[in-house]
């Protein structure tokens, strides 16, 4: 079965989360995870994203950079969205492509177009 893997350009853990929140508040223009900026506000998930996530016909997996690298080979850049299907990985959206998006609606539209048929 296919799944979409979302890899945030941030490391896991409570302290890292606090630093990320502070960075998003103090200097959002230099925050390095455009995926997080699109899908989450300062403290919570965006409503449109939560609705999309909960209704997705394809399983979605969310990993921080360090969690991804524990399971898979490191990538050259993060954030990234990957499609894992038949033990193959394919890039759906690169870091550069994610950086070009300005709204959650744009991200959702692209993902809906890229969703594999289940």
Image: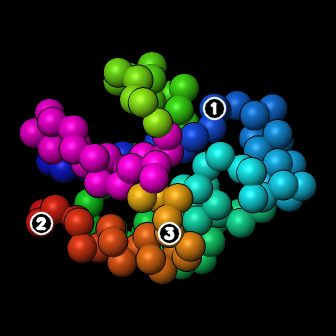
Q: Are marks 2 and 1 in contact (CB under 8 Å)?
A: no
Q: Which residue is mark 1?
A: 11
Q: Tell me, yes or no, whether the highlighted magenta stretch contains residue 83.
A: yes
Looking at the image, which residue is at 23% across and 66% down?
114
Work out whether mark 1 precedes mark 3 in sequence or the reverse, and give the earlier one.
1
Q: CA distance from mark 2 to mark 1?
A: 31 Å
Q: Between residue 71 and residue 8, name the one nearer to us.
A: 8
Residue 2, visible in the rendered structure: yes
Q: Which residue is mark 2?
A: 117
Q: Secondary structure at mark 1?
A: loop
Q: Secondary structure at mark 3?
A: loop
Work out whether mark 2 precedes mark 1 in sequence or the reverse, and give the earlier one.
1
Q: Which residue is mark 3?
A: 101
Q: Is residue 24 left or right of residue 95?
A: right
Q: Between residue 4 and residue 95, name the one nearer to us.
A: 95
Looking at the image, which residue is at 82% across and 48% down?
23
Write down the quadrant of residue 19 in the picture.
top right
Work out whether mark 2 precedes mark 3 in sequence or the reverse, and give the earlier one.
3
Q: Which residues are magenta?
A: 78-96
Q: CA distance from mark 1 to mark 3?
A: 22 Å
């Amino acid at each position: 079965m296919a799944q979409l893997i979302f890899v945030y350009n941030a490391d896991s853990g409570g302290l890292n989360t606090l630093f990320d929140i502070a960075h998003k508040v103090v200097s959002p223009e230099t925050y390095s995870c455009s995926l997080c900026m699109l899908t989450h506000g300062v403290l919570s998930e965006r409503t449109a994203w939560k609705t999309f996530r909960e209704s997705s016909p394809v399983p979605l997996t969310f990993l921080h950079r360090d969690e991804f690298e524990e399971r898979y080979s490191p990538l050259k850049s993060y954030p990234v969205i990957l499609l894992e299907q038949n033990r193959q990985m394919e890039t759906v959206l690169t870091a550069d492509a994610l950086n070009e998006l300005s709204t959650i609606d744009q991200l959702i539209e692209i993902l809906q177009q890229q969703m594999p048929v289940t």
